[in-house]
Amino acid sequence: TLADALEKFSVKEIEKILNESVKILNEGKFINDDIYICDPTDIETTKKCKGCGRKTVEEEHLNKKTGEIIKTQKTTYGFKLLVIRGVKSGIVVSAKFAKIQESEKNYTLCLIKQAEENIGKKIKVLLLDRGFIDGITLWEIKHHFKIDFVIPAMTTMDITKDARGLRNSSDENI
């Protein structure tokens, strides 16, 4: 399992193995996607796992007898695996390990840089979730890397309200 591999190799060694493997696949013309997804996954461990992070979140549970909502704290130990993978092929072209509590947005640009080192400038569209939202980073993705991106927006976000306002506008110049 991945947890077993984490014990045998350092994070840097695992990243190097992955990156070198991706370069070989690319040289063999096995990587043909142009739409990619940046995808985070939490890998839970015990607190004894060397180098792991710690994340505490508040959970809500419904007491079925009383109907009241009970809030509890849950602490999770582990790592966050961040990858860029092809949408059609599922092939991972870049990966980074972080502590479980760290934000995805801190690693977006280095993942893209590593992907380009591994496969060249094949990423035309990058699908991101809201954990990657950061204005400066998104500007870099579009203007420095020349990659279009798609992020689903929540109905309460200003960008959603702006888009709906533009959609409903009668101004023909928009």
Image: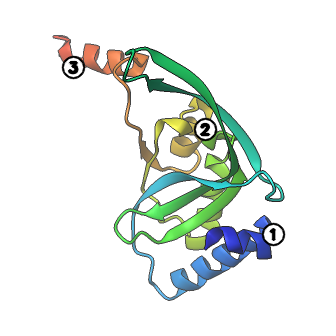
Residue type at mark 1? Answer: Ser
Q: Nearer the viewer, residue 141 or 36?
A: 36
**Percent position of residue 47, x then y:** 78, 51
- Closer to the eye: label 1 or 3: 1
Mark 3–mark 2 CB contact (< 8 Å): no
> How many other residues sit within 10 Å of disc 1, few (<14), some (14-19) or many (≥20)?
few
Residue under pointer 2: 137
> How many other residues sit within 10 Å of disc 3, few (<14), some (14-19) or many (≥20)?
few
Q: Nearer the viewer, residue 73 or 116?
A: 73
Q: Secondary structure at mark 1?
A: loop
**Percent position of residue 105, x then y:** 62, 40
* Residue at image point 77% right, 71% down: 7
Is residue 40 rendered to the left or right of residue 149? right
**Is tag 3's residue or tag 2's residue first in the polypeptide sequence?**
2
Question: Does the image show residue 174?
Answer: no
Is residue 56 rendered to the left or right of residue 93? right
Residue under pointer 3: 167
Quarter of the image that includes the C terminus: top left
* Residue at image point 59% right, 64% down: 94
In the depicted structure, whether residue 77 falls above or below residue 6: above
Is residue 151 rendered to the left or right of residue 23? left
Question: Does the image show residue 151?
Answer: yes
Residue under pointer 1: 10
**Is tag 1's residue or tag 3's residue first in the polypeptide sequence?**
1
Mark 1–mark 2 CB contact (< 8 Å): no
Measured Cα–Cα span from mark 3 to mark 2: 26 Å
Residue type at mark 2? Answer: Thr
Measured Cα–Cα span from mark 1 to mark 3: 50 Å
**Percent position of residue 46, x then y:** 73, 54
Q: Residue furthest front?
A: 65
